[in-house]
Image (cartoon, coloured by chain):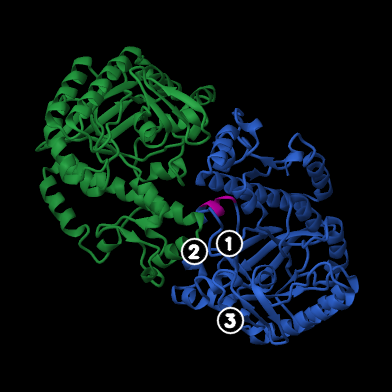
Chain colours: A blue, B green
Amino acid sequence: MSGFGFDIAATDGAARTGVITTLRGEIATPAFMPVGTGATVKAMLPEMVAATGADVVLGNTYHLMLRPGAERIARLGGLHKFMNWPGPILTDSGGFQVMSLARLRKLSEEGVRFQSHIDGSEHMLTPERAIEIQALLGADITMAFDECTPFPVTEDEARASMELSMRWAERSKATFKPEGGRALFGIVQGGIYPELRQRSADALKEIDFDGYAVGGLAVGEGQETMLGVLDETVPALPADQPRYLMGVGKPGDIIGAVERGIDMFDCVLPTRSGRNGQAFTREGPLNLKNARHADDPRPIDETSTCPASRDYSRAYLHHLVKSGEILASVLLTWHNLAFYQTLMAELRDAVRAGSLAEYTQQFNALYGKGANSCEE
Amino acid sequence: MSGFGFDIAATDGAARTGVITTLRGEIATPAFMPVGTGATVKAMLPEMVAATGADVVLGNTYHLMLRPGAERIARLGGLHKFMNWPGPILTDSGGFQVMSLARLRKLSEEGVRFQSHIDGSEHMLTPERAIEIQALLGADITMAFDECTPFPVTEDEARASMELSMRWAERSKATFKPEGGRALFGIVQGGIYPELRQRSADALKEIDFDGYAVGGLAVGEGQETMLGVLDETVPALPADQPRYLMGVGKPGDIIGAVERGIDMFDCVLPTRSGRNGQAFTREGPLNLKNARHADDPRPIDETSTCPASRDYSRAYLHHLVKSGEILASVLLTWHNLAFYQTLMAELRDAVRAGSLAEYTQQFNALYGKGANSCEE
């Protein structure tokens, strides 16, 4: 896998900090990847995303295959050029979005046939096609195609789903071409069942990937259960390769997962919340729609280096949100991404300093305990 | 009027180029002022507006008095601080918006009583209140309160409306306090009737303003009629003070008005068109919704210094527009504002070089004559 690598610089308990190397740049871990679903981190210019400290963004196979089409993006020079993001891009395989967005899904050993949620057109995703699409997009990190196991399910259902995903993981690996320093990650499934997670991890290690994701979590099982699954699953993953917890999450989820040895995260929460008038702060989320902000001259965070956090009053942001102004989405998304990247930078510092437990305690003591906790 | 001034550096026929001085910065003329209706140039960060070369933005008395309220903005430190725009701001007086947006208007000698288009609440705008609101906002250039004469109207109706506006202009001047280097502009009315325009200009000169606007145009009378009114009106205005054509306009309108001696413009066209998927180019407007752009790797204008014009393909912009992405509005608004500011800079250069006629001829030969002219 020339061009792709992972070096751990320091550990603190199960937590680690390090650097993932790709041909398009380095990714400091633990890393949060802003979600760029349809070839845009919603409401952001790429330079705004970069200014928050994000090293890598995520693209969605499902959305991009439907619009504007993977072959079209390839003809136009690939996803990096298309969306003007020169840094690393991780693409998911479409497995999760097919389950959550597509219509009339028909699952078979071969793959998933479905109708587009945009125009009803019929499509097929297989491990081979999901890997091909990600190659057309030019992903630096490609995800194996999996079935995102629903929640709740019985252990038998979770086993059958996991075993299908493992067969698809093998087909993903067989068809993947590690050209241009590209990496391929496998995805551990198995629902909330420790034995299934262990077997899934073993199966993936047997196939041999460049990194290992934990999928099928943050789907309604709750933080305690999710962290419990990580307690069981992470030790079964190779210590010297990146670990990615997919679709997670709230600040507390991320901190708990970092404590358990996770290196990478993605979530729509900072971007989606921003478009809904919500701003993350150390004391918990603020709802800028709330009239109590209408005369508040304070910025969201005057200590931030992000202009959105520092240069606009809460009164102004309230006004923009109430008025339905595009700038509300722009500023609050930007602030939230900066908040998440600052959190990740502090977690990296804490691991390096061996003070993660202290950091976590301080964070949790403040977060959600302020006057704003009711606003989430 | 310490702090406010106007110096003409060069003329070319009736056209002139110069600098308006305010305590908050200089305005190179002819100037285009992006419209920041509700304390935001829609979809733009202030630094993006500044990067296009805009020296001054416009704020709307009508919108801001209704939401978030002029007294609130004053308590928060004024409009500049509120919207994070440190440069000059011109505010209109609300006369035009009351006519075009408010409900249940009741016009009297005193002013206009109306209901908010936002929540139906009842409000009153008088010359005294319009000037007070603009002082609360902290406008660098304040506009007299006027009645925007509808179109079409009879000459008698236009005369009565103009005469009311002249009485309101006198009351505006009487209540205005030229503190902090603030300037007050009068507004010429009179519809399409040369004699009324002449009498309106004379009345305003008698009152004595820092600058003179031409109002009540671009309301459906067509470019030829509009420029005809300017031919009659501009010579009646003082030569050594700024002249502002309100609410105009298309590139060709602006060029024609500069040729006739206008120094300042504002219009929602570049911002509104951007949110509707339209991009201005030298060959005419492009409609990025059009499927013919889906595979076009060219940027809108590779020679531009604006990132929005230069760093994104038409194919990408088409994708964003089709997907309803916020970034479509951001990039196309930014491009259009850059296009307008480049046009103004070139007009200033042409006047300085004495080559305005040549520039106009070249611009008009290209604009609207390209493959895109049908897309407007």
**Occupied quadrant, residue A373:** top right
Give the chain letter at badge 2: A
> Which amino acid, by three-letter code, is at mark 2?
Met
Q: Amino acid at mark 1?
A: Gly
Against B365, residue B352 (above or below) is above
Percent x, y of residue B276: 41, 54
Q: Please tell me the numbered disc located at residue A132.
A: 3
SS at circle 2: helix
Q: Any magenta on residue A280?
A: no
Question: B53 or B122: nearer the eye?
Answer: B122
**Residue A51 among those drawn in magenta:** yes
The residue identified by callout 1 is A36
Callout 3: SS:
helix
Q: Is residue B166 visible?
A: yes
How far apart marks 3 and 2 lie (CA) works out to 19 Å
For the residues labelled 3 and 1, say whether their Cβ atoms are less than 8 Å apart.
no
Q: Is residue A108 left or right of residue A136?
A: right
Span of residues in magenta: A48-52
Tell me, yes or no, whether dots 1 and 2 are on the same chain.
Answer: yes
- Taking the spot 61% from the left edge, 40% from the top edge, the residue there is A304
Q: Mark 1–mark 2 contact, CB under 8 Å? A: yes
Q: Reading the chain from its start, which is encountered first: label 3 or label 2? A: 2
Q: Amino acid at mark 3?
A: Glu
Secondary structure beneath label 1: loop
Q: Residue A83's mark?
A: 2
Q: Position of residue A277 (x, y in %)?
A: 62, 44
- For the residue pair B70 and B301, the one nearer the viewer reads as B70
Specify the subunit that label 3 lies on.
A
